[in-house]
Amino acid sequence: MNQRSRSGSSSIYRVAICALLVCYALGQALYAPKKTNAHAPEQSYLYVRVYEDRLGGRFEMTTPDLNRSLDLGLRPQIPKTELDEKMPAIQKYILDNVRIGNGTENYGIRFTETGLMKNSSLGDFVTVSFELDGVKDIPESLLIEYDLLFNENPGHQGLVIIEYSWKAGIHNNESIPALVISEGDGPQSLSLTKSASMLTGFLAMIKLGIWHIWIGFDHILFLFALLLPSVLTLKKDDEFDRLEGRNEWKPTDRFRPALIKVVKIVTFFTIAHTITLSLASLEIVTLPSWLVESIIAISIALAALYNLRPMLIRKEWLIAFGFGLFHGFGFASVLADKGFAGDYLVLTLLGFNLGVEIGQVAIILVVFPLLFLLRRTPLYKHLLFWGSCLLILISLYWFVERAFGIDLPVGYWILRMLGQA
C-alpha cells in the first residue's frame, strides 16, 4: 500500500472514530433514564401545560380512590356515558379541594374534556382536562393547594408534573414529577421559569429532531437505501447501455467528494421535509395519516430499487427531495404526539429540522467510512443487491399494513421467536 493510500485509510478511520464519539455524546445527552413514581398505587396526578400565552392541564385519579372519597360506585371499565353522569360530582370535588394561583390571586379552573384511561392493575384513571381563566401573563411560579383524596387515605400523594413547557424544553412528559404533595403540606410553589429560556426550548427541539431520526426505523432504512450506493459511481456515458435504459455501478475512487455528495443528497431530503412540515404545522396542507405513512413505506422500496436499476442518472437528490416531502408530513405527526401546541413556531420548526439533519449526518459519518472500505470487495456487490432486496421486502410489508389497515402476522412471529410476544 502506497503512502497516499495509507493516509486516505487513516483519514477514514479518524472520521469514523470521531463520528462514533459524537454519536455517543449525543446519545448520552438525549437519553438519560430517570426513576419515576408515575402511575403507582395511592397516587393522583396534576399535569400542568405551559403555553406561550395560557395555562392548562389535566387531573388523573383512579376510580377506586374516587369511590373511597365520594362513594360514586364507579365500576371497572365503566362506559363513558355512565362516567359523564358522575362527572359533575367529580368536578365539584376538584374545585372544592384544589386552588391554583400566582401567589396574589387564584385562577379560575374551567373544565374542557373528560375521559377514562384503562389500567388493569390500579383501576381505571378518570381524566379531567382544564384551562385556567384569568391568566394575563405567564407567572414565574404557580401556588398550588392540593387536597384531593387525602380525606379517606392520609398516605395518599398528589404528584404535580409539568407535562408541556416549550421554554423549559419539556414535551409530553408524563413521568417526572416537579412536586410531590402529601396531606398537611399546605400550598406548594411550582416554578415555571426554572431552566426556562428561548435557548433551552430551541435546544430541546434540536434534541427531539435528533432522537426522532435515531428511533425512526423507517426513516433510518430510507437513509440506508440512499447510503448503499454512496460509495459507488455510475459508469461513464459511453459505457451506458442506452438500449436497455440502465447503467451499472463501479467503486468510487475518492472519499471526500463521495461523502460530500451523499451529505448534499440528504440535505435535499431535509429541505423537502422542512417545507411540508411547515405547511402541516400551519394547517395549510394536511394529508390522511394512512396515506402519508404508506408513501413513507413505499419510498424505501423505490430508493432501494434505484440501487438495483439506476435509471435517473446522477439524480439521486430528486429521490431524496421527492420523498422528503412526504416524510415531512410524518414528522408533523411526531410534533403532535409530543404535545406541540404551536408555540414559537419558527424556532420549533428550525430546531426540529436542524436536529433531523444533525441526526442524519451523524449516521452517515458512522456508516459511510465502513462502506467506503468495503466498496471494492466482492462482499459489497452482494451487500448492495441483497441489502436493497431486503429493504424492498420490508417496505412492501409496511406498505400493505399501512395502506390497507391490517396487521400481518410476520411481525408477531418474529417477536415470538425473539421471546418478546
Image (spheres, rainbow, N blue to C red):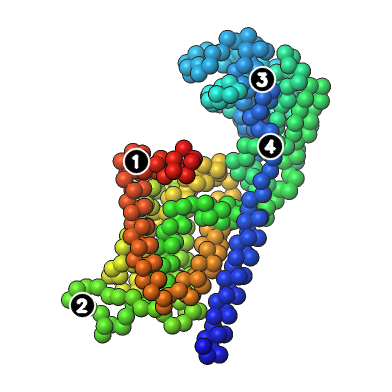
Q: Residue 54 placed where, x, y %?
A: 63, 37
Which residue is outermost to the left? 243
Q: Secondary structure at mark 3?
A: helix
Q: Label 1 belongs to which residue?
A: 408
Q: Residue 147 falls in which quadrant of the image?
A: top right
State which mark lies toward you, 4 or 1. 1
Amino acid beneath label 3: Ile
Which numbered disc flags the more N-terminal residue, 3 or 4? 4
Q: Are marks 2 and 3 in contact (CB under 8 Å)?
A: no
Residue of label 3: 94
State which tag comes first along the sequence, 1 or 3. 3
**As drawn, is 348 to the left or to the right of 278?**
right
The residue nearer to you, when weighing 43 against 113, is: 43
Circle 4 — which element?
A: loop
Please tell me how many numbered marks the rendered image carries.
Answer: 4
As measured in the structure, the alpha-carbon distance from the residue carrying label 4 to the one carrying label 1 is 35 Å
In this figure, which residue is indicated by the disc labeled 4?
A: 36
Of the two numbered discs 2 and 3 in the rendering, the one whose residue sits closer to the viewer: 2
* Residue count near mark 1 (Cα–Cα under 10 Å), binned few <14, some 14–19, many ≥20: few
Residue name at image x 60 percent, y 10 percent: 72
Number of the label disc, if any, that sits on residue 242: 2
Q: Element type at marker 1? A: loop
Counting residues from the start of the chain, the first of labels 4 and 1 encountered is: 4
Tell which residue pokes out farthest to the bottom in this image: 2
Q: Are marks 2 and 4 in contact (CB under 8 Å)?
A: no
Q: CA distance from mark 2 to mark 3?
A: 76 Å
Whole-number angstrom distance, CA of label 3 to CA of label 4: 25 Å
Q: Is residue 55 visible?
A: no
